[in-house]
Image: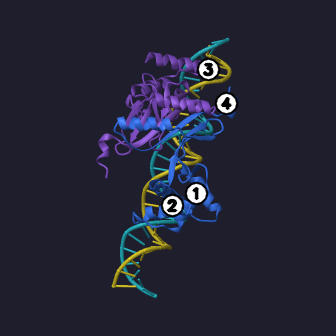
Chain colours: A purple, B blue, C cyan, D yellow
Amino acid sequence: MDSTKEKFKTFLYSRGLKFTPERRFVLEEAFIIHDHFEAEDLLLSIRRHNRRVSRGTVYRTLDLLVESGLVRKVAFIDKHTHYEHVYGHDHHEHLICLECGRVIEFYREELENSLQDVCRKNNFNIKSHKMEVLGYCKDCDHKKP
Amino acid sequence: MDSTKEKFKTFLYSRGLKFTPERRFVLEEAFIIHDHFEAEDLLLSIRRHNRRVSRGTVYRTLDLLVESGLVRKVAFIDKHTHYEHVYGHDHHEHLICLECGRVIEFYREELENSLQDVCRKNNFNIKSHKMEVLGYCKDCDHKKP
DNA sequence: TAGTCAATTGAGATTTAGTCTAAATTGCAT
DNA sequence: ATGCAATTTAGACTAAATCTCAATTGACTA
């Protein structure tokens, strides 16, 4: 956790940017939340911890966190952008239940390998990817007609 | 092309819905466009063909087309929803260039198989999936610092 | 052919995620 | 302290998408 703070600081300084209290609040909050979150969630969480950061700053800081590699943008279930922190949270894909909205994470080596291979063959310099699998989870499947 | 019209008709009738001229215009236009398109693009195309369909109807009809399986929602590059028609356009994934926005389609059997396997092991009843791979295409890669 | 009624449409208001702007504030270097 | 660039805030703004509701359409039946 402290190491993430250090990393973010280093990232900011390397660009001549400042590690302000507001940016610290956003960073800390992003790492307190263990699930996927939306920008708006984060704003509320911050408020709930009696800290005041404007919406604009939250969005701008999230962009910086993504650029620094500490936070990822992940699956869009619908139309909101979702984020998740990276520390202690390796890359994975998502199964998303259409009924209850549950998100199941998975990682499959061979799948990632295939993808790398495809990119190599297309001379595509891959920066990131995400997979969104929609369907019904075990619990919801038999409820459906 | 006529078969898509028949399929859509059948789908609509099976739900007690009507095959109206407006729905036909949307269907036809969606199959004239060969690339990914956005709802707004479609609206403009329709207008350009001197047909008048309201924005609301376009969105509503696209939803129906997706439900009927004739059209897919695909990769979100940014924040708009993109669509593509299904007929003569098998399932595939997308490489998206961050620089020029080009979309390269690919299909890899083993990747799809891995995914099916993951779903089976998680008792997940898969309905659809999409993969969005971000990076730089061959042409843009060397332009970047 | 007229009457009925649910399905449908269009126009415009509304929502909402996200961006932008301008003025005030902060933080660092001198 | 002073100066200046970076930053923040509040609120205006944008754009995609949805919603509302009155008017229209179209299938069916008498």
Residues beneath discs 3 and 1 located on the same chain: no
In the rendered image, residue A55, in percent from the top left (x then y), is placed at 49, 35
Discs 4/1, front: 1
Residue hosting label 2: B57
- Foreground mark, 1 or 2? 1
The residue that mark 1 highlights is B31
Q: Which mark is residue A16?
A: 3
Q: Secondary structure at mark 4?
A: helix
* Parent chain of label 2: B
| Chain under disc 1 | B
- At label 2, the amino acid type is Thr
Q: Are marks 3 and 4 on the same chain?
A: no
The mark nearer the N terminus, 4 or 2, is 2
In this view, the residue in front, D8 or C18, is C18
Indicate the quadrant where residue B134 lies.
Answer: top right
Q: Residues within 10 Å of mark 2 (few under 14, many from 20)?
A: some
What type is the residue that disc 3 sits on?
Gly
